[in-house]
Image (tube, helix red, strand yellow):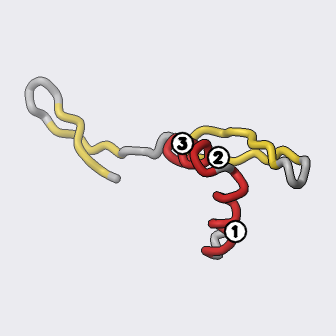
Amino acid sequence: MKGNNVSFSNKKTKRRFYPNLHTKKFFIPEENAWITLKVSTSAMRTINKKGINACLNNLIKDGKI
């Protein structure tokens, strides 16, 4: 996403809005393994809500993995 930095004098310069990404380790109990994913904070909230297995199955079903 793109936008502007706006100074006090109302001067505008271009800037970018980057996603809030973090590297996070998740444990998968069925496989007894840890995986490391680079996920956004909103994705972490979704994984905490639904569970890592449901999110992985959804990604596999959509063909993104």
The residue pinned by badge 1 equals 65
Give percent across and percent down for residue 11.
13, 34
- Residue at the far right: name it: 32
Residue type marked 3: Arg
Give percent across and percent down for residue 17.
37, 44
- Disc 3 to disc 2, C-alpha distance: 13 Å
Give the number of the disc on residue 45. 3
- Residue at the far top: name it: 8
Residue at x-position 69% and y-position 39%? 24
Of the pair 31 and 13, the residue shown nearer to us: 31
Q: Secondary structure at mark 3?
A: helix
Disc 2 to disc 1: CB gap under 8 Å: no
- Disc 3 to disc 1, C-alpha distance: 20 Å
Q: N-terminal of the two: label 2 or label 1?
A: 2
- Disc 2 to disc 1, C-alpha distance: 14 Å
Question: Is residue 42 left or right of 33 when viewed as pictured?
Answer: left
Q: Residues within 10 Å of mark 2 (few under 14, many from 20)?
A: few
Give percent across and percent down for residue 27.
80, 43
- Vertically, is 65 above or below 47? below
Residue type marked 1: Ile
Disc 3 to disc 1: CB gap under 8 Å: no
Q: Residues within 10 Å of mark 3 (few under 14, many from 20)?
A: few
Q: Quadrant of the C terminus?
A: bottom right
Of the pair 25 and 28, the residue shown nearer to us: 28
Give percent across and percent down for residue 36.
75, 45
Residue at x-position 74% and y-position 40%? 25
Q: Secondary structure at mark 1?
A: loop
Residue type marked 2: Lys
- Which numbered disc, 3 or 2, marks the residue closer to the eye? 3
